[in-house]
Amino acid sequence: MKTLSVREGYDRWAEVYDGDGNPLIALEERHIGRLIGEVAGLDVADVGCGTGRHALALATAGARVTALDFSRRMLEVAGTKPGAERVRFLLHDLNRPLPLADDAFDRVLCCLVAEHIPDPGALFRELARVCRRAPRGAVVFSVMHPALMLRGVQARFIDPGTGKRTQLASHPHQVTDYVRAALQAGLGIEHLSEHVADASLAAACPRAEKYVGWPMLLLMKATRQRASRRSTRSQRVWTVMSEKSAAGVIRAGSNRSSAGRASRRRSTASRVSTPSRMTAGDEKSSCERTSS
């Protein structure tokens, strides 16, 4: 399988991105709406917007949307879609500081892109910087579950120019890398969940069949919090909690058949008991593993 740089890969993928039956996108879209919430009248940044699947929907729902991506071709495709005139699209490399003002956005989305960023800490610092403080602002984050890389899976597609299976350069970050990056950026994590493929996803997206019972998606919602004397202790506690959670998910996923049966028996696995504070925020947080 050929591996391309992220920029070249997404430029080529743009031609077929919206119609190639990607099960990760389908799984994310089942769950992310409740984390984003109502957006009418809000300022939204879509960081790594691709062909505009979230940006355009949020603009249609009444948000003022700024959308960034470093694939010129992805942005060109987004610009041809209905409603594109409502979105401010910017060509920008996410490895560099965002060209956005501090405290400027009520929602900051970063969806299915972080595995391509070598330094998640720098990314989360920028997401936190441009997000307004709680309770108004929130960062909503999704990423391919790190457990997929244990199976040799990276973002990939059939190159329409060559007909060959092609993958994009990725970095093997772990769940704890994302959790630690968010906490060290001054964010309080309100929601953290890991989602597996199930039979219903496989029925809708045949490419998901081989992953039934295996973790595919990590979701997070976080808010900017005031610092407190308990912040450092909370970071340590939650890093340990997330390590245990990730280890449990990977152990469960390694037995594909039994995990698949379990995911079909219930729509949501039992919640992990968690401390009432993840950082300095007063919100009760949860870490959960769910089926799709």
Image (cartoon, grey):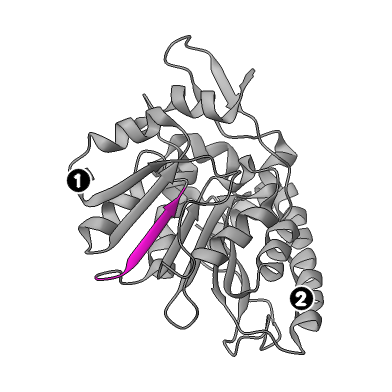
Res. 220 in view: no
Residue 214: % across, % down: 63, 49
- Image quadrant occupied by the N terminus: top right
Work out whether residue 255 or residue 69 is closer to the camera in this orientation and state it.
69
Q: Is residue 129 magenta?
A: no
Label drawn at residue 21:
none
Label 2 sits on residue:
235
Q: Residue at x 42, y 80 (%)?
A: 136
Q: Residue at x 57, y 34 (%)?
A: 155
Mark 1 residue type: Glu
Compared across the picture, whether 91 is left or right of 239 comes to: left
Residue 202: % across, % down: 46, 43
Compared across the picture, whether 141 is left or right of 124 comes to: left
Contact between marks 2 and 1 (CB within 8 A): the answer is no
The label nearer to you, 2 versus 1, is 1
Which of disc 1 and disc 2 is earlier in sequence?
Answer: 1
Label 1 sits on residue:
85
Q: Residue at x 25, y 57 (%)?
A: 59
Which residues are drawn in magenta? 41-47
Residue 124: % across, % down: 62, 59
Q: How packed is label 1: few (under 14 Cα within 10 Å), some, or many (20 or more)?
A: few
Residue 192: % across, % down: 60, 68
Disc 2 to disc 1, how far (Cα)? 42 Å
Work out whether residue 6 or residue 265 is closer to the camera in this orientation and state it.
6
Mark 2 residue type: Gln
State the image quarter where residue 180 is shown. Answer: bottom right
By secondary structure, the bulk of the magenta-drawn segment is best described as strand
Single out the residue that lies furthest toward the top.
Answer: 162
Res. 162 in view: yes
Q: In what element is the residue under mark 1? A: helix
Work out whether residue 129 or residue 77 is closer to the camera in this orientation and state it.
129
